[in-house]
Image (tube, helix red, strand yellow):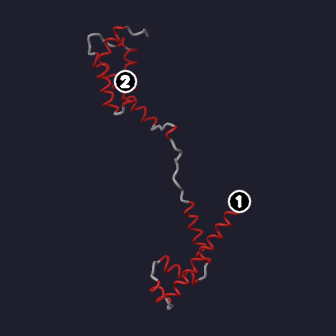
Amino acid sequence: MTQPSLQTKASIEPHIPALRRYARSLARDRDDADDILQTCLERALRHFDQFRPGSNLRGWLFRILRNEFISGLRHRQRRGTTVPLEDWHGETGVAGGQERLMEIRDLSRAFGDLSRRDRQILYLVGVEGRSYEATARLLNVRSGTVKSRLFRARERLRGRLADDAGRAGAARAA
């Protein structure tokens, strides 16, 4: 390939602003459009010997630009989307939920270790959402009794959960 002549460069230069606008309309991104335009101009200069004198130079340049744009699209489709390393924050995974499942398992185990009376009061008030009065009528006790039993049951449940957490921490440290 020979170097493009000054005449070749001069004949292409007036078409650059229109080519740039066309590239921007295709790419919809200034940087991508500039890259497509540069590739188009390089190709046009490199293969100017293939241009037939007397034919439409502007149309030939626009066809090169359009073909470059389409080639780029096809290339990106084959390769997939790329993200620059500095933009990637390393959050590729999704939380598995294991920690939440372990908390539920520990709560279920600690709840099961409570006395039947503690489980019953925690279930009626804490799980079913019954009022103290409704729970008192159901259990045939006073409302104050429900409140005190519920307080003690919650304390025992917290204690068991804390004991389990302490044992788990000690096991991890060992």
Q: SS class of the residue under badge 2?
A: helix
Q: Nearer the viewer, residue 37 or 169?
A: 169
Indicate the position of residue 77 as horizontal and vertical percent values.
42, 36
Which residue type carries mark 1? Ala
Question: Which numbered circle lies on residue 74?
Answer: none
> Residue under circle 1?
173
Please, is residue 116 above or below residue 162 in the view? Answer: below
71 or 134, nearer to the observer: 134
Q: Residue shown at 45%/86% (left/top)?
A: 133
Query: Which of pointers 1 and 2 indicates the residue nearer the eye?
Result: 1
User: Where, quadrant-wise, is the N terminus in this rendering?
Assistant: top left
Where is residue 53? Give x, y as percent: 29, 10
Residue denoted by label 2: 37
In the displayed structure, 157 sits above or below 53; it is below
In the image, taking residue 134 as reference, residue 149 lies left or right, namely right
Q: Name which quarter of the figure residue 75 lies in.
A: top left
Percent x, y of residue 94 = 51, 52
Q: Is residue 79 above or below residue 6?
A: below
| Residue at 51%, 79% in the rendered image | 123
Residue pictured at 34% horizontal, 24% vertical: 65
Residue type for callout 2: Leu
Report helix, strand or loop for mark 1. helix
Number of residues whose C-alpha sits closer than 10 Å to that of mark 2, classed few (under 14), some (14–19) or many (20 or more): many
Q: Quadrant of the C terminus?
A: bottom right
* CA gap, disc 1 and disc 2: 62 Å
Residue 116: image quadrant is bottom right
User: Badge 1, how many Cα within 10 Å: few under 14, some, many 20+?
Assistant: few
- The answer to which of 47 and 99 lies nearer the viewer is 99
